[in-house]
Image: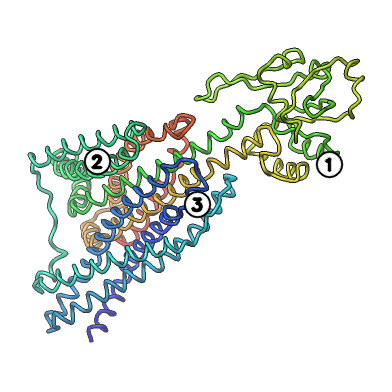
Amino acid sequence: MLTKLAMTGFKHRWRDYLVLFSGLIMSSAIFYMFEALATNQDFLKQNTSISMVGLIFQFGSVLLTIITLVYIGYANSFLLSMRKRDYGLFMLVGARKSKIGQLIWLETLLVGITATIVGILVGTALTVGVSQILINSLGLTLHHFTAWYTPAAIATLLLYVGLFLIAGLFNLLSLTKTPALKLLHSNDQPNRPQLKPARQLIEIVVGVISIAIGYWSMANLKILQLMGIGIALVTIVLGTYLLFNAIFVWLMVALKRFSFAQRGLNGFTLSQLSFRIRNYTKMLSIVAMLFALALGAITVGMGFHSQIPSMANINNAYDMGLVNASTAEKAQIAAMKPKTTATYHFKATKKVVYFQAAEFNRQPFTTIHTRNKNQLTFNTVHNNAAKLQKSEDNYQLMQLQSGVMATATPVFLSKTAYAKLAQPEQRLTVFTTNNVIEHRVALNKLAKHHFHTTSPEQFGGRYARYLMVNGMYSGLEFMGMFLGIAFLAMLASCLMFKILSGADADQHRYKMLDKVGTTRRQLNGAINKEIAVLFILPGIVGIVHVLFGLQMFKIIMVTSPYTGIWLPFLIFAGLYLLYYLITITIYRRIVLQ
């Protein structure tokens, strides 16, 4: 009988359960996506030369576990809020508390285990999709990466099942000890914010000091090493929560005292925000941290991506050099529409390569002379034969040779002296395209055809350097972009779940406004403002965290981590706006039926 009543309640509130299930599925899916990287030691070792990355991921796992703990706690409270009235009715009609306790336990476990298993499957599918998009669009080279990683699945399942076991026990103790009448009216108890100036002042001071310590430790990561990450993890999370808990409550109460709160539906909007204020502060703290993690990871990933061509360009002025290029290979070069192309004839011994000086006088050879290796700035120098013979950068010419000739010494002879050499004459064709990355597919095909390999050790030039640098930073670039997308999805899941979980309870308030003559435009405006506040506040805090947090990447990035920062910020703002529009659209459909 109880099971039948429970199923009837489920059918009645299927939309709320759908919100709950979708939120838990996304949470476990994102946790699995993170663990698929964090627990794969072979992938971490093979795809980055930064030894601290593994430890950073361990700290990241701890942070994500804390976020997951709070998220599941909130999801469990949402589950309780949906079922309290039902359980209260069961008690009033004579159901035994022991039976209700069993039902609570089984329902909590069933919801948790089902959502976790589906979430792991969804996480695997998302890992496949996201990884393929990133690998194909960015031209990454990864080793030992797999979408399905058993240790990650086990870790996700154990964590979530363990948390839901604890949640089931908590629900059992909470509901069976609560009187039936209190359960029936539990959702009618508002959590009114109250100003406690002394307590809030202490929270603000401690919060600011904690965040300042966290920012300082990230900026001095070179000195603090691993300890700096741990300090930042604890202090920034603590400081963010304290500031939200103190300032947000104060704002909601203080804004109601201003005259603009009486205009239109502003007072209603502020009341909506303050109705469940304590729950909002916890969730907004999580969202602010996820916002910072997502934006920071994407910014760092794009930073590594943008510095790869810069590091490739300082190696050589030419993309590739081909010895005795065939007619088909010349056609491949022409198809790329190169900016410059030159052909130099030479004769070679094992230790010396002889060139015609006149050809270099007609077609000067361009070399790269770096001014500041840290900033990757350089000059291009056009050399004739005399300058190239004396230049310290003439090794760049020999890089474009192949085999043993790459280590030989260049010598530039007159036409007469060159003609007297008995060695057979060969040709070196060099060329430069407008962008190595843009033409990487064509360059890869050309390298396979001419050198019978794409191993950068077998040929020189900008493309070979690009392959080496890309191989070195592909792992870091992929991790940044992949985790940025994962944290962005987690952020959206948390914020949308929080907002939509209260939509059903808010429905009758909007119905009352509609009955007293409020226009649809005013109702839409009130919804837009309310949800905009919930998106903007964590966004501002998250941006500040990112701007200070990028300091810790100075020790592993060649260029400044702030270079081109506007692009990832702009992309992220667009995605964040998209989530906002989706949220208000769904919320409107629920409350404005």
Q: Residue at x 83, y 41 (%)?
A: 328
Q: Please give the label number shown on residue 74.
A: none
Name the residue type under label 1.
Ala
**Residue 256 spot, x, y in % from top left:** 15, 43
**Residue 495 spot, x, y in % from top left:** 32, 53
User: Which secondary structure lies at badge 3?
Assistant: helix
Residue under numbered circle 1: 328
Whole-Å distance between the Cαs marked 1 and 2? 62 Å
Mark 3 or 2 closer to N-term? 3
Q: Residue at x 54, y 54 (%)?
A: 144
Q: Would you say residue 26 is visible in this rendering?
A: yes
Decide: is 22 above or below 416.
below
Mark in front: 3 vs 1: 3
Q: Would you say residue 572 is visible in this rendering?
A: no
Mark in front: 3 vs 2: 3
Q: Quadrant of the C terminus?
A: bottom left
Within 10 Å of disc 1 (Cα), the crowding (few <14, some 14-19, many 20+) is few
Q: In this rendered view, identify the residue nearer to me: 265 or 532.
A: 532
Name the residue type under label 2.
Thr
Residue under numbered circle 2: 235
Identify the coloring.
Answer: rainbow
Whole-Å distance between the Cαs marked 3 and 2? 30 Å
Name the residue type under label 3.
Phe
Left or right, 456 with respect to 539, comes to: right
Left or right, 260 with respect to 124, comes to: left
Left or right, 174 with respect to 477, comes to: left
Q: Quadrant of the N terminus?
A: bottom left
CB atoms of marks 1 and 2 within 8 Å: no
Residue under numbered circle 3: 43
> What is the quadrant of residue 164 in the picture?
bottom left
Whole-Å distance between the Cαs marked 3 and 1? 39 Å
